[in-house]
Amino acid sequence: MLLAALSTTAAVAAEAPAGIAAPAAASAALDIDSFAKGDTFSDIKLSPTGEFFAASVPMNDETALVIFTRENMKRTGVFRVGRHNHVDDFWWVSPTRVLISMAQKLGSRDEPIGTGEIFAINANGTGADVLVGYRVQGRGAGTRIQPKKVEDVAAFLVDDLPAEERAVVISVQPFKADAYSRAERLDTFTGQRNLVALSPVRNTRFTTDNAGVVRFARGFGTDNVRKLFYRPGNNTEWTLVSSDAGENGMDLPIGFSADDKTAYFQTEHAQGPDSIVAFDIATQTRKEILRDKVADPDRIIYRTNSRIPVGVFFADGKPRTVFFEKNSPEARQYKSLEAAFPGDAVRITSQSADGKLSLVEVWNDRSPGDVYLFDNENKHAAHIISRRSWFDPAQMASVKQVELKARDGLALSGLLTTPKGAAGKSMPLVVMPHGGPYGIQDHWQFDDDAQVLAAAGYAVLQVNYRGSGGYGEAFIQAGRREWGGKMQDDVTDATRWAIEQGIADPARICIYGASYGGYAALMGVAREPGLYKCAAGYVGVYDLPLMHTTGDIQKRGSGESYLRDWIGTPEALDKVSPARLAGKIKVPVFLAAGGEDERAPQVHSERMEKALREAGVPVESLYYKSEGHGFYEEAHKREYYSRLLAFLSRSLGGKVATAPKPETKQ
C-alpha cells in the first residue's frame, strides 16, 4: 500500500522487474532495467504522535515530499517545487506540521546545494507555504503588516525545538558567497522571524543547547580557515574556542549533556582519527571519552528525541555502533535490534515522541535497504517499505573490506565486490575510484555501479585513497594538491595489490570512475599504460586549469582559495591533466557527460575526446544535452550502462546488456 501511495504521486513504478540472476557465461546478456530504476524513497520519518509518515520521493530530476497515514497508508499531502529542485531534508516540527529544506542538483551524482529556502506543509496537505527564501513575496504596498521578510537570504534549520510546536531556530545569511549569518526564531506557520544571535564568523553553523539557546558558532572566511566560537548565553560575547590554526585540533560541536554543563565535540587531531571529547564549560577542561584506532565517527547517535549524544557509528567496513553511555536505553535498543537483524547494518531514523514506536532502516552490501516500524514495548517489527523491492539480496554480489599499504607505507582500506559464484581468484577486475575527492568515503553498502559490474562478471575494487574521509584529518590533508600524484599512486598500488593477492587477472583489468573518479581513471591509463586494458570516465574533469575558469566551484569567493590550496594553481596543473597527456594513453577510452553539468562541464569530456582522437587513441563518447552531473532519465541510464558494459566487454570479456529500447540521442 505504501508503494502504491508513493507511486501515484511521484511516478514510481508499481510493477517491479524480476530479481537479477547470478552471473552466467560471459557471452550471456544482462538485464539492466533494475539498475536503471532509482530508489523508491530517499528518507522517511515518523510523526511525533506516530499518526503519519513523511517521505522524500525522488523522480527523474526533482524530489517530492509525500505524507500518508500510518494506519492505512492513505496519501494526505504532497509537496514539490519543480525541475532540479529537491527536498533535501524535512522535520516534523509538530504532530501535524512538516518543515522542508530545499536543494538543487544538476545531475544524479551532483552534490546537493541548498537553495536556502524553508517551506512548510500540514500533514493533511494544506498550509503549504514558503517561509524563508528568495521566493517569499510580500502582501503588497497596501499594507504594513508583513509577517514574512521579503529578502534574498539563505536559511537553514539549526534546532527544531521539540518542546515547542510553532517555533524553530534557523540560521540566515544574505544570498551571496561567504556571508555572515544570524540566528533567528522562525514561526513555522506565519514565517515571522526574530533575531536570536549574530555570528562572529562567515559561513556559519550554529549549535544550540537543550533549551534552544545558541551557544556555538562555527564557520570560515575566504581563507577557508575554520574557527569555533562559544558564548555562555543570550546577549553575551563570543570567545574563540578552537581553529584550524590552533594546537588542539578543530572541534565540531555535536551536542550537550542533559544539564547543559558539558558540551560534546568531535575533535580532529594532527594524527589519527577524530575523537569524541567532553568539554566542561565551567572549567574549560577536556576529556576524551571515545576514539577508535582507525576510523572517524561517521554518525552520532542521540538520546531519543533529544540533542544529547550517547554513541556513534563507525563506518570502516560494516557499520558498527559504540556507546560512551554503555547502559543507556539507546545502547540496549541498538543491541536488541542488531541481534534481531544479524549481518545487517541497523539505524533508527525517527521515533514517536513517547518513544513507543521507532522507524528502523536495515541494509547490507547486497540489499539497498528496508524500513521497519518497531514497537518498542512489544518488541515487534513490521515491514513498511523497501528501497528497491525488485532486487533479491540472495542473488547479489557480496562486498568485503580489504586493507593494504601504499608504497610510502600509508595504511589504506577499500572494498572488494566479488561476483556471486566466482572463485575469487584471477578474476577480471574493474578498479573504481570514488568521486569527490576530499572527505568522501566508499562505504560498505549496496553500490549500483559495483553491483551492475559484478552482475556482468567483474570483481570491483574501490580504494579509499589519501584525501578520502573517515580516517582522520591528517589522512584528508595527505591528499592536498595530490591530484595525479600520491592519490593516483594509491589507486595504482591498490591495483597491484589485487594482482599480488591473486584476486585479479593482470591481463584483464580496467579502470572506471565518475567525477574525480573519471579523472583518476584517465590519469591512471596515462601514468600506467601497461596496467589497465581500458578506461571509462563518467562526468569527469580532465583539463584541470579549466577548473579555475569554468564550473561551480570557482564561482564562490572561497572557491578560488579552495582550488589553489587543494588542487593547485593553473600553471602547475598541465602535467596532471589527462586532456594534455593523451599521447601517453595507449588503451581504449569511453567518456560520458551531460550538457547541463556545472560541476564538471561537458567541455572537459569534449577536450579529452578531441585530444584522444588527435593522438590516435580509440575513444567512444555519450553526451546528453539535458543531463547534468550524472544522468537522471531511466532511458539515459539504461543506454549509459549498456554502452559501458559493451565497452568493458571488448577488453575484459564480461556480459553485455540486453538491447535497450530505441532512444533518440540529443
Image (cartoon, grey):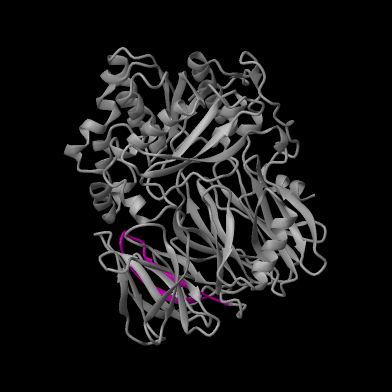
Spot occupied by residue 515 in the image (x, y as percentages of width and height): 41, 37
Q: Quadrant of residue 154?
A: bottom left
Magenta stretch containing residue 174, yes or no? yes
Magenta stretch containing residue 232, yes or no? no
Does residue 263 sit above or below 508 in this rendering?
below
Residue found farthest to the left: 571
Q: Residue at x 61, y 16 (%)?
A: 26
Q: Nearer the viewer, residue 140 or 110?
A: 110
Does residue 452 sit above or below 172 in this rendering?
above
Q: Quadrant of residue 411?
A: top left
Report whether 516 appears left or right of 658: left
Report whether 657 appears left or right of 195: right
Q: Residue at x 33, y 39 (%)?
A: 487
Q: Residue at x 36, y 50 (%)?
A: 475
Q: Residue at x 27, y 31 (%)?
A: 577
Q: Nearer the viewer, residue 554 or 531?
A: 531
Report whether 559 appears left or right of 27: left
Magenta stretch: dominant SS? strand
Spot occupied by residue 477 in the image (x, y as percentages of width and height): 31, 51
Report whether 289 appears left or right of 246: right
Q: Which residues are magenta?
A: 167-186
Q: Is residue 497 visible?
A: yes
Spot occupied by residue 617 in the image (x, y as percentages of width and height): 34, 14
Q: Nearer the viewer, residue 125 or 167?
A: 167
Does residue 491 sit above or below 101 in this rendering?
above
